[in-house]
Amino acid sequence: MQCRLRNKRILVTGGGGFLGQAVCRELASHEPQQIIAPRSHEYDLRDRDAIARLLETTRPEVIIHLAAVVGGIEANRRNPGRFFYDNAIMGIELMEQARLSGVEKYVVAGTICAYPKHTPVPFREDDLWSGYPEETNAPYGLAKKMLMVQAQAYRQQYGMNAISLLPVNLYGPRDNFDPTSSHVIPALIRKVIEAQAQQQRWIEVWGTGSASREFLYVDDAAAGIALATERYDHADPVNLGSGQEITIRQLAETICEACHFDGEIRWNTDKPDGQPRRCLDTSRAREQFGFVATTPLSTGLQKTIHWYRQNVTSKAA
């Protein structure tokens, strides 16, 4: 039975974050009664009592759990314990309290990092258990993967309508551009634009450039999450992606071109590439709830670069 979002009270954890803001904007078009986006300083989702207080105060009918502690390769290497504990405990406690509160629909936003390191391309949801995740982000990926197991177990035992989504790498305006924790697209955009500002004729990029990734524009991801929340009610996890693969070398060259930077790209091969390839089979999302990404990478990059120039570099000038 579909969960119509009109007139529903919807709680979005992480609603003030990069993806969360986009999801809240998308949900507003469904005319819910209320969208609740609590902040971490108000309710610590690692604390059971805080979660119980949140649910008692807001009485949500639908929960979309987006809150996460995330970062790029270096952030994962430096914080494996934190990334495991914080992500696992938030999701586990929130789902349990949601069950006890009788929440109608619960949506888990997982991660592409849950897939095995050498998953055949394109990644199919049935391959999730065919090996161990890539080492640099395994603690994060496994923590989020356990929430998928919890959702399936709660559906089986308690009849809870909990679903699991697996978004690929996201990007777009308002992304995290902090060099210590950002993912590859915002990190590259910042490097290129700062090199231009400093009249530097080269940038350094980690790895060999041979690894590939798939990217999903944040507004497309938000649309997919809203569609799944309304239309999808099954135990099987679902990939959310664009289905388009690009190597890091091609990506770096594309961003340099989009920024009109003609300097040298120097590859630091002492640094890790991460998972060798990432590209999703997105057929389940299309078939089950009609989601197809619509923003080409070139368009999304231009929008992201424009936002960064207008909102970050202009303020720093």
Image (cartoon, helix red, strand yellow):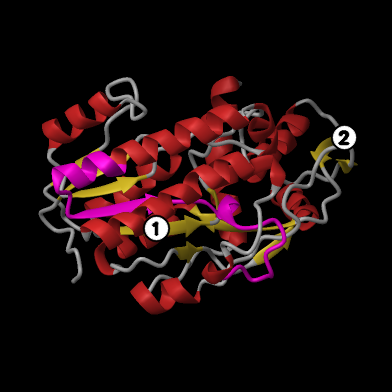
- For the residues labelled 2 and 1, the Cα–Cα distance comes to 45 Å
How many discs mark residues in the rendered view? Answer: 2
> Residue 109, image x and y in percent?
41, 51
Asked whether residue 99 is in view, the answer is: yes
Which of the image's four quarters has the N terminus? bottom left
Disc 2 residue crowd, few under 14, some 14–19, many 20+, Cα 10 Å: few
Residue lying farthest to the front in this orientation: 157
The amino acid marked with disc number 2 is Arg
Report if the CB atoms under discs 2 and 1 are less than 8 Å apart. no
What segment carries the magenta color? 95-124
User: Within the image, what quadrant is residue 300 found in?
Assistant: bottom right
Q: Secondary structure at mark 2?
A: loop
Q: Is residue 92 left or right of residue 101?
A: right
Q: Write down the residue under mark 2.
A: 201
Residue 317 in the image: state x and y as whole percent: 61, 21
Residue mark closest to the camera, 2 vs 1: 1
Where is mark 1, residue-wise?
164
Based on the displayed image, in which of its 4 quarters is residue 40 positioned? top left
- Report the residue at 52% width, 63% height from top: 241
Q: Amino acid at mark 1?
A: Ser
